[in-house]
Image (cartoon, rainbow, N blue to C red):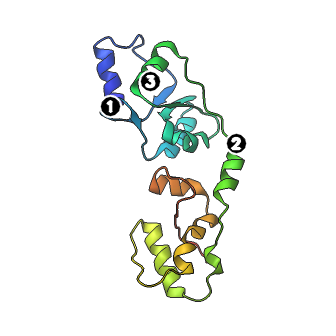
Amino acid sequence: MPVALGILVAYGGLNEKEVPDCILVGELSLDGGVRGVRGALPVAIEARGRKISRLVVPELNAKEAAMVGGVEIYPVKSLLDVIRFVNTCNGILPLKVDSESLLSEAQQFLVDFKDVRGQHSAKRALKVAGARGHNILMIGRPSRLGQNHAGLAHAHDPAPLHVRRGPRDHQDSQCCRCARC
C-alpha cells in the first residue's frame, strides 16, 4: 500500500503530498483491496511511543491495533478508502474498542488443557509445537489433548501471540509455553 500511495503522489492522484502524524500499514491486493498484515500490534505500540496519533490499518487488523491506547485506529477495506482518507481526512471513523471485554472474551474456553491428567510428554509436545508454530500429527482416536489444545493460550497476555502468529480469531487454537499446565 505505501508503494501504491507513492505512485499516486508522483502522478498527482492525491491532493496531499504528506499525511502528517499518521502511519499507513497494509498490503495491497491485485483487486485494490487492503489485506491484513502481521505486526499491527507492535506498529501501534511504536506509533504511540513516537507520539504519532493516527494509524491507518487493514480492517482485519483494526481490533488488534486498537488494543493500544493513545492512537486513533482507522480501518480501511480498499485503496479507495485510503485515498479518500488522505484527500479529505473524513469518511472513515476511528475504531473504538473495549479492550477489557475483548480480553475477557478471548479468555473463555469451553474445555481446558489443565483438565487432562497425566500425559506429561504429550502435553509437552503440544506446548512446544504450538509455541514454535509447528504442526503435530496425532494418530488414534480423538482425545482430550486435541480438544483442550486451545486452553494453553489462556495463561498469557494475547499481545505476544498476535506478534508471533499474526492476526487470528481468538477462538482458534493457539498454544504457548505455559508453566501451569
Q: Which residue occupies 65% across, 80% down?
A: 115
Mark 1 vs 2, N-terminal side: 1
Q: Position of residue 95 (x, y in %)?
A: 61, 32
**Residue 180 in sight in this render:** no
Secondary structure under tag 3 reads helix
The residue that disc 3 covers is 82
The residue that disc 2 covers is 98
As drawn, the label of residue 152 is none
1 horizontally vs 120: left or right: left
**Residue 97 in sight in this render:** yes
Callout 1: few (<14), some (14-19), or many (20+) C-alpha neighbours within 10 Å? few
The residue that disc 1 covers is 31
Which amino acid type corresponds to the residue marked 3 in the rendered image? Answer: Val
Q: Position of residue 21 (x, y in %)?
A: 52, 24
Determine contact: label 1, label 2, CB under 8 Å: no
Q: Residue furthest front?
A: 141
Callout 3: few (<14), some (14-19), or many (20+) C-alpha neighbours within 10 Å? many
Q: Residue furthest bottom?
A: 118
Gap in angstroms between the C-alphas marked 3 and 2: 25 Å
**Image quadrant for the N terminus?**
top left
Mark 3 vs 2, N-terminal side: 3
Gap in angstroms between the C-alphas marked 1 and 3: 14 Å
Which amino acid type corresponds to the residue marked 1 in the rendered image? Answer: Asp
**Image quadrant for the C terminus?**
bottom right
Q: Nearer the viewer, mark 1 or mark 3?
A: 1
Q: Along the line of sight, which residue is nearer the eye, 16 or 32? A: 32
